[in-house]
Every structure is written in C-alpha cells, then in structure tokens.
Amino acid sequence: MDRKKVVLYIEDNLLNFRLVKRILHANNYVVIHAEDGQSGLRMARYEQPDVILQDINLPDIMGTDVVRTLKNDPTTEHIPVIALTANMMYGDREVYMDAGCDDYVAKPVTRLELLSAIERRTMLQATA
Ligand code: MN
C-alpha cells in the first residue's frame, strides 16, 4: 500500500477549504492548510507536499506571486501547483500558467475535476 499523498491547500476562505478537504479525505488524501501566502510558502518548504492547491486572492500576497516564489525556490520548484480560482475570465489561464501553475480548476470545484487534476499531476510527478 502506497503512503497517502499530501495535499497543501493555500486558501483563506474556510468554506472552500472544508469542501475540498471533505472531497480529498473521502479519497484517501492527507490535507494540510495554510490561510495566507506567507504561511503557505513556509508549509510548502517544511512539509514538502505532493501537490499544492493555490487560491489566487489571499489576504497578504497574490496567489500568483506565491506560485512564482515556489517555482523559483529549489526546495519547492518540483511540487506541482494547481490554481483554484473563481476569476476565470478570458486571458486568466495565461496569467496562471505564466506564474508557473501546472494546471487550474475553476471554482466552484467539482469532485471529478478536482480529483482528476490532482491525479494527473501526482502521476506525472511520480514518473518524472
Ligand atoms: Mn481567497
């Protein structure tokens, strides 16, 4: 039996966090949580999660800046990042990909979209 995969969710909205946590717990993931960008960066470095779910609008720094920092840090650059965001307007995809996001899922997230994005990223990681 493989060890459980660890997902770090950087999200200031607790309702969103609880929804995602419920979905992921039901599917055998361990979920850890940071409520702002700075603590998200710290947790990413210390906990080395298998994947990061990144909210964009955070109280301290923009999620896109969190991702830029993660992808420029040799201790975290390998961790796949999936943006979770309600602001999906024309051109937003490019902004997220430009910041270094590996994928994105639009809010409100559906169970299927979320799980398939995570599975896709963690599998690519395992074979890299
Ligand atoms: Mn937010």
Image (cartoon, grey):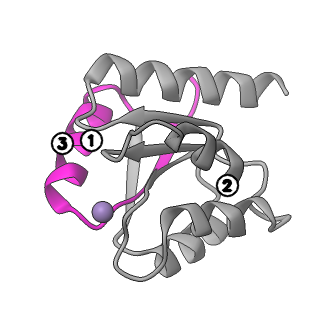
The residue indicated by pointer 1 is: 20
**Residue span colored magenta:** 1-28
How many residues crowd around disc 3 within 10 Å: few (fewer than 14), some, or many (20 or more)? some
Residue drawn 47% across the image and 46% down it:
7
Mark pair 3, 2: CA separation: 26 Å
Q: Is residue 7 magenta?
A: yes
Q: Is residue 81 magenta?
A: no
Q: Which quadrant: the C terminus?
A: top right
- Whether ligand 1 has any atom under 8 Å from the Cβ at mark 2 is answered as no
Q: Which quadrant: the N terminus?
A: top right
How many residues crowd around disc 1 within 10 Å: few (fewer than 14), some, or many (20 or more)? many
Residue drawn 33% across the image and 16% down it:
112
The residue indicated by pointer 2 is: 99
Looking at the image, is 43 positioned above or below residue 128? below
The type of residue carrying mark 1 is: Val
Helix, strand or loop at disc 2?
Answer: helix
The residue indicated by pointer 3 is: 19
Q: Are marks 3 and 1 in contact (CB under 8 Å)?
A: yes
82 with respect to 58 (left or right): right
Looking at the image, is 20 positioned above or below residue 75? above
The type of residue carrying mark 3 is: Leu
Q: Position of residue 90 (x, y in %)?
A: 46, 36
Of mark 2 and mark 1, the one earlier in the sequence is 1
Looking at the image, is 111 positioned above or below residue 67? above
Residue drawn 33% across the image and 25% down it:
27
Quadrant position of residue 70: bottom right
